[in-house]
Amino acid sequence: MLFLYVTSNMICVVPFSTTYFIQYYYYLNNPSSAIATVFQFFRLLVNVSYGTSFYVYTLGTPFYRDELFKLFKRIRHRLHRHEDSTVDIHRHQVVREAGD
């Protein structure tokens, strides 16, 4: 659990820190649009790191992990049921058109 938490934080925070340091070190008051875009993307990753820490700790609890698996099973069941009904509708249309 701790390894996953540290890894996710490093992936999310280190790129932002690096670009921030480069921007500060080179005194880039007016960075190019490409550098600004990269900086904003890495800034987004820093905000994602807050969410990942929550999910890592939440899914570390067996109760929440089991509930998540149940949710995935329900979604998969609904998608499978929807695919079956779509196939049945298509078959019905083909049979009806053949009868015309």
Image: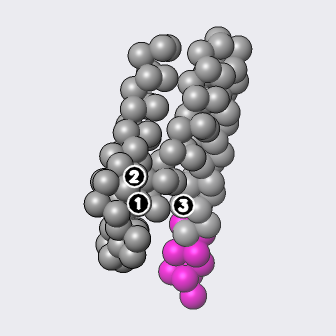
Name the quadrant of the C terminus.
Answer: bottom right
Instruction: Give the amino acid type for the residue marked by disc 2 in the picture.
Output: Tyr
Left or right for 89, reference 45: right
**In this orientation, which residue lies closer to the viewer: 67 or 11?**
11
Residue pictured at 54% horizontal, 66% vertical: 91
**In this orientation, which residue lies closer to the viewer: 70 or 52?**
52
Q: Residues within 10 Å of mark 3 (few under 14, many from 20)?
A: few
Residue pictured at 57% horizontal, 46% vertical: 47
What residue is shown with label 2?
Answer: 20
Q: Is residue 69 visible?
A: no
- Horizontal and vertical percent for residue 49? 53, 38
- Horizontal and vertical percent for residue 97? 55, 82
Q: Which of marks 1 and 2 is nearer the N terminus?
A: 2
Q: How crowded is mark 1: few (under 14 residues within 10 Å), some or many (20 or more)?
A: many
Examine the rendered structure and indicate whether residue 33 appears above or below residue 23: below
Residue 98 in magenta stretch: yes
Left or right for 74, reference 37: right
Examine the rendered structure and indicate whether residue 37 appears above or below residue 67: below
Confirm or deny contact between disc 1 and disc 2 (CB under 8 A): yes
Please tell me whether mark 3 or mark 1 is closer to you in this view.
1
Residue 94 in magenta stretch: yes
Q: Residue 39 carries which label?
A: 1
Q: Residue 91 carries which label?
A: none
Instruction: Give the amino acid type for the residue marked by disc 3 in the picture.
Output: Val
**In this orientation, which residue lies closer to the viewer: 46 or 83?**
46
What residue is shown with label 3?
Answer: 87
**Count of numbered badges drawn on the protein:** 3
- Magenta residue span: 91-100
Query: Residue 86: which quarter of the image?
Result: bottom right
Q: How far apart are marks 1 and 2 (CA)?
A: 7 Å
Q: Residues within 10 Å of mark 2 (few under 14, many from 20)?
A: some
Q: Earlier in the sequence, mark 3 or mark 1?
A: 1
